[in-house]
Amino acid sequence: MKVLLVNGSPHKEGTTFAALSFISRILNAEGVDAEIFWIGNKAISGCLGCGYCGEHKKCCFNDVVNQFTEKAAEADGFIFASPVHYASLSGAMTSFMDRAFYSDGSGNNSLLRKPAGALVTLRRTGGSAALDQLQKWLAYNQMPIVTSRYWNVVHGNSLDELMQDTEGVQILRVLAKNMAWILKCIEAGKQVGIEPPEIEEKTFLNFIR
């Protein structure tokens, strides 16, 4: 079993990385492999709605998004993490999520129904709004959302400050253990022949006709 931990911060080894590294260690202790995937600090274009991914099964921009969706096929679960910028996700993370989920859902379905958690790091406030934003993609893709004992928010501007947020550290630990537990439950279900429900063709209804 493997969990892909997505670092949506422009800082490769900042507070978001520190939080994911802590989660990675807990997952490893639970017998689950973990890999941190950094989206980088280069500009990430938003989705153009061009339809290229529907025909070619990948995004028209051959960048970090396509790199991620290739890795996603081999992952059993995900944790998507971002710093809070103006009470929302980082701009790059928003563009990354839009394109990753849209292009994957247009042909690969490497994310569909796999357990996923959302996590935000911040200095002071805006965490609930950003966390809600991040979980929207997961719900749309029928991904069982892995929770902790409170909102998945941790505070700090450095590793030292993060570790002082003792409640936040507990949230990270419980999140990691819940992820490992759910993955093990899914694997146990497979062993006894429990199959997921049939995927229904999506029904679209426009409110303005």
Image (cartoon, rainbow, N blue to C red):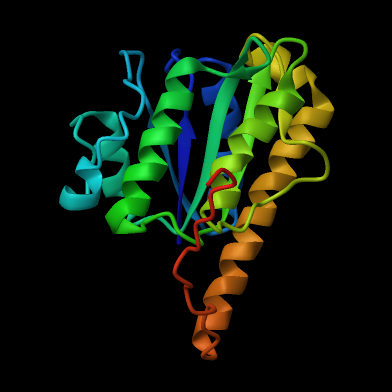
Q: Residue furthest front?
A: 209
Q: Nearer the viewer, residue 59 or 162?
A: 59
Is residue 72 in sight in this rendering?
Answer: no
Asked where in the image residue 62 lies, by quadrant, the reply is top left
Q: Position of residue 157 (x, y in %)?
A: 65, 9
Q: Position of residue 111 (x, y in %)?
A: 42, 54
Quadrant in which the N terminus is drawn: bottom left
Q: Nearer the viewer, residue 22 or 205?
A: 205
Against 161, residue 136 (above or below) is: below
Residue drawn at x 47%, y 28% as measured from the top left: 7
Asked where in the image residue 59 lies, by quadrant, the reply is top left
Against 43, residue 185 (above or below) is: below
Residue drawn at x 33%, y 20% as measured from the top left: 44
Asked where in the image residue 183 lies, by quadrant, the reply is bottom right
Q: Position of residue 28 (x, y in %)?
A: 53, 50
Q: Position of residue 113 (x, y in %)?
A: 51, 62
Q: Is residue 97 left or right of residue 127?
A: left
Against 194, residue 17 (above or below) is: above
Tally of numbered tags: 0
Residue drawn at x 36%, y 57% as measured from the top left: 110
Q: Nearer the viewer, residue 102 or 196?
A: 102
